[in-house]
Image: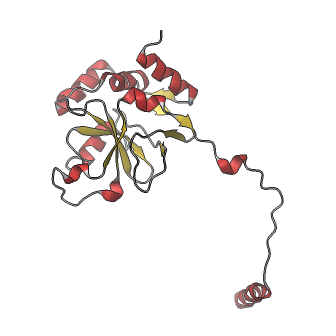
Amino acid sequence: MQSSFEKVKQKLLEVGITSESGIHSDDLIISFEQKYGFHLPQDYKKFLLTYGRINYNHQISYSQITNIPKHDERGRMGYFYYLQNDKHDLISNIECYLGRMPESMIPFADITGGDQLCIGVTEDVWGKIYFWDHDQEHFDPTEEELWNNVYLVANSFSEFILSFQIVVDEDVRRDLGIVSVKTTPEFLKLVEKFKSKKQ
């Protein structure tokens, strides 16, 4: 029988996610955990140890337990953060969102537009995956308001990964056939007027 993480690795392979470089060491992750005073969930820790910086060249969607206002039923992945010093560095992104999201979670991936995917790192939410909506962010929020733009996505990192699907571009699949464009005399007059102005 496959272990839970073996299933995660199989799913990542199915959707074309591979390790690009920089697989992280145990010492690096232990140092990271000590810096912030928490322990990462085991499945996410194994992901960092196995993959480091990852690479994929197509859109990937994931399922969400909670309906998120003004967002599609399935979310779309951006970039996973990792323990290397660049714009997708895990530490710099944690620092960026300190005081902007609940202290019980850290961002581990971004989504196009500024939203974040977060993982719980304290006992009450440990290992759960959340969506942090930047459009609903409060200025100088109270502890309660920090939760107002947070939505549960999955009960574990493994559950989150196992929901991955490659996004098929409907525009590529659809055969448009012959496309015709109709114009009115008024439109043609405007075109001629514009052309004469340019001359």
Q: Position of residue 8 (x, y in %)?
A: 46, 23
Q: Is residue 100 visible?
A: no
Q: Vertically, is 48 above or below 150?
A: above
So how many labels did they put on this image? Answer: 0
Q: Residue at x 43, y 40 (%)?
A: 64
Q: Residue furthest top?
A: 1
**How did the renderer colour the structure?**
secondary structure
In this rendering, position of residue 187 left or right of residue 57: right
**Quadrant location of residue 91?**
top left
Q: Residue at x 43, y 57 (%)?
A: 70
Q: Vertically, is 170 above or below 56?
A: below
Q: Position of residue 19 (x, y in %)?
A: 48, 27
Q: Residue at x 24, y 29 (%)?
A: 32
**Closer to us: 177 or 18:** 177
Q: Vertically, is 121 above or below 5?
A: below
Q: Position of residue 170 (x, y in %)?
A: 66, 48
In this rendering, position of residue 165 left or right of residue 90: right
**Closer to us: 80 or 63:** 63
**Quadrant location of residue 34?**
top left
In this rendering, position of residue 48 left or right of residue 148: right
Q: Quadrant of the C terminus?
A: bottom right
Q: Residue at x 56, y 31 (%)?
A: 15
**Quadrant location of residue 58?**
top right
**Closer to us: 92 or 173:** 173
Q: Is residue 132 visible?
A: yes
In this rendering, position of residue 111 left or right of residue 17: left
Q: Position of residue 33 (x, y in %)?
A: 22, 28
